[in-house]
Image (cartoon, helix red, strand yellow):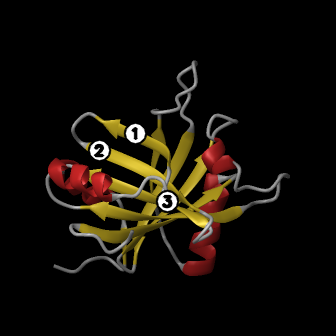
């Protein structure tokens, strides 16, 4: 699952009920000074065009940390991990493995998965720039695994905007 050709562990992700408060909590507890924020408007976009997810990213010690706030009830894969109530909740959700290289590497990676043992529960794409699937590994690992591929130019753009701590020295 994790040690496949052209893939590497790249991310640990948490869901939260309050993205701003979660970012502040990580800054206070772990010294993560800032995040790159974005909204996901596909797939699962609600009919009014509101994003289903608010996302914050930072690279800490070489691993990307992702915070995800589901918006409304449009993203149960993410919101189901959160407890009821208004108190701040931050819950571990998934790890991610990135497939490097050309799109053919992504196709080979997905073809190599035993989808009976590792069922896909969420997937999406952004043209020829991004592919991702989430496999349900809760029975064995207790969490999901995101498999993601980005075209080299998109990966370079993300690396340019997502803050890295400690900063990379040239």
Q: CA distance from mark 2 to mark 3?
A: 24 Å
Is there CB contact under 8 Å for labels 3 and 1? no
Q: 10 Å neighbourhood of mark 2: few (<14), some, or many (≥20)? A: some
Q: CA distance from mark 1 to mark 2?
A: 8 Å
Give the residue drawn at x 46%, y 33%: 43
Is there CB contact under 8 Å for labels 1 and 2? yes
Q: 10 Å neighbourhood of mark 3: few (<14), some, or many (≥20)? A: few
| The N terminus, quarter of image | bottom left
| The C terminus, quarter of image | bottom left
Tell me if 30 is positioned left or right of 82 in this view.
left
Residue 15 visible in the picture: yes
Give the residue drawn at x 53%, y 32%: 44
- Between label 3 and label 1, give the one nearer the viewer: 3
SS category of the residue bearing label 1: strand
Q: 10 Å neighbourhood of mark 1: few (<14), some, or many (≥20)? A: some
SS category of the residue bearing label 3: loop
Q: CA distance from mark 3 to mark 1?
A: 20 Å
State which quadrant residue 23 falls in. bottom right
Give the residue drawn at x 36%, y 58%: 113
Residue 158 visible in the picture: no
Horizontal and vertical percent position of residue 146: 44, 57
Mark seen at residue 124:
1
SS category of the residue bearing label 2: strand
Horizontal and vertical percent position of residue 158: 29, 54
Mark 2 or 3 closer to N-term? Answer: 3
Q: Nearer the viewer, residue 4 or 99?
A: 4
Mark 3 or 1 closer to N-term? Answer: 3
Mark 1 or 2 closer to N-term? Answer: 1
In the picture of the structure, the residue carrying the numbered disc 3 is: 117
In the picture of the structure, the residue carrying the numbered disc 2 is: 130
């Amino acid at each position: 699952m994790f040690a496949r050709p052209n893939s590497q562990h790249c991310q640990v992700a948490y869901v939260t009920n309050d993205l701003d408060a979660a970012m502040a909590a990580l800054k206070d507890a772990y010294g993560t000074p800032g995040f790159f924020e974005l909204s996901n408007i596909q797939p699962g976009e609600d009919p009014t065009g509101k994003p289903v997810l608010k996302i914050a990213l930072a690279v800490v010690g070489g691993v990307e940390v992702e915070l995800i706030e589901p918006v409304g009830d449009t993203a149960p894969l993410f919101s189901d991990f959160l407890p009821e109530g208004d108190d701040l909740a931050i819950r571990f959700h998934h790890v991610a493995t990135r497939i490097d290289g050309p799109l053919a590497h992504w196709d080979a990676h997905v073809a190599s998965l035993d989808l009976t043992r590792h069922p896909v529960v969420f997937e999406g794409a952004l043209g020829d720039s991004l592919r991702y699937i989430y496999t349900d590994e809760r029975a064995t690992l207790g969490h999901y695994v995101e498999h993601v591929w980005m075209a080299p130019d998109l990966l370079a753009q993300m690396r340019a905007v997502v803050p890295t701590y400690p900063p990379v020295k040239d």
